[in-house]
Image: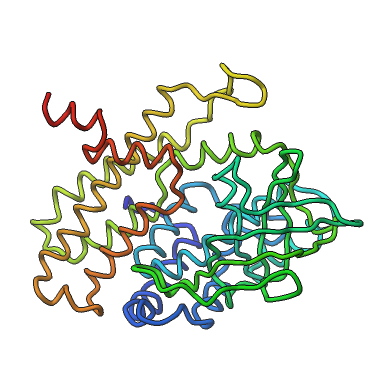
Amino acid sequence: MTLTPHPHPLVVRARRLATDLLLPEAERVDQDWVPASHIEAVKRSGLLGAAAPADHGGAQAPPAVLRETAEILAGACCATWFVQTQHHTPVQTLARADGPVRERLLGPLSRGELLSGVAYAHLRSYPRRPVRVRPEGDGWRFDGTVPWYTGWGLNDVLLLAGVTDSGEALFAFAEAREQPGLRASAPMRLAALTAARTVSLELDGLWLPAGAVALRTPYEQWAAGDRVRTLHTGPAVFGVAEAALSLLDDTTAAPLRCRLADIRRTAYDLADRPAPDIGGGSEERPVLPSAWVAERLAVRAEAYELLRTATTAAVVAGGGRAMAVTSRAQRLAREGLFLLVQGQTAESRGAQLRALGCGPAGAERRHG
């Protein structure tokens, strides 16, 4: 990545954390679990408050700093990065909220005293409703299944979302522990990031008080903002690609580093441009300009292609040794596979498949 002349203190802390702890332990963690000591180190670093408001103890760092710290952590230990990155959405949700839950949790989350997870990706399957919410007494009842929840046993609280019968997306905080109405599966064994302690959550009448609600909004309004976020390329892609290139000799890595720098620059420039006023559709189904969407999906696909190339090159350069499960090259290659589907939507999946030459558009490119 392009280093800043005077690195932000959070960037300095992220590099120190990566160099002194995360990278030396990464292969061991990959075969086990992210230890609580890693999370405590992240909490002490102040990185959990990177995006949090300053008046609640956070750093309120600019986007460039948030991206650079994410790249550093993901490149050092993607499992630890993935656990802690969940935290930033609850913080940003609370920063825009009001009411008792904001006053109760925003400060502790901003200062890194508590770690939050998230349980909302299932909202993207709407109109299916894996998690249903309905009013009950002076609170809300949650029923259904959260297919993926990361950080179980490490998080203090979780931001849980579901959809009401009237089509609202409702987000509320709960303690991240088994309790009446909430039961976790055994941790999943995955091809990559098993260490991040991912489970599914069964909700059978989990009741949360009205004061735990952080956001209640029409589903389509939430989905429009979520769509914009998922069109952009996440910094972890560049962090893992950079880590893979560090395993190559300078001559081999040089052309890929140039491509990485170009794609990163374009991706971040697109992310920094304000989203257009959403129009062209009904109020219930806002529409983004097709060219605006296509440009971002194309850059995202290009970044994934580079990630695959970089991690594959690291495996090839490692030879037979890269087949050992303790190989750094193999770990990075598996983490690259994980990033291909992390935060995936039907829209981004289709764009990735087309970029791989699948489907009618891919056939036209192959035979055109």
Where is residue 265 drawn, in percent x and y? Answer: 34, 40
**Could you tell me which residue is drawn at 76 percent across and 73 percent down?**
180
Q: Is residue 312 left or right of residue 281?
A: left
Q: What colouring style does the render use?
A: rainbow
The C terminus: image quadrant: top left
**Could you tell me which residue is drawn at 24 percent across and 73 percent down?**
328
Q: Is residue 119 left or right of residue 303?
A: right
Residue 253 vertical position relative to residue 368 in the rendered view, above or below: below
Between 289 and 125, the one lying in front of the other is 125
Where is residue 226 drawn, in percent x and y? Answer: 56, 41
Where is residue 339 drawn, in percent x and y? Answer: 37, 55
Looking at this rendering, what residue extends furthest in the top direction?
A: 280
Q: How many marks?
A: 0
**Could you tell me which residue is drawn at 60 percent across and 64 percent down?**
117
Where is residue 246 drawn, in percent x and y? Answer: 21, 64
Specify the quadrant of the image occupied by residue 55.
Answer: bottom right
Looking at this rendering, what residue extends furthest in the right direction?
A: 137
Q: Is residue 334 left or right of residue 272?
A: left
**Could you tell me which residue is drawn at 72 percent across and 65 percent down?**
204
Between 54 and 238, the one lying in front of the other is 238
Between 135 and 231, the one lying in front of the other is 135
Specify the quadrant of the image occupied by residue 128.
Answer: top right
Between 307 and 53, the one lying in front of the other is 307
Q: Is residue 129 left or right of residue 259?
A: right
Specify the quadrant of the image occupied by residue 312.
Answer: bottom left
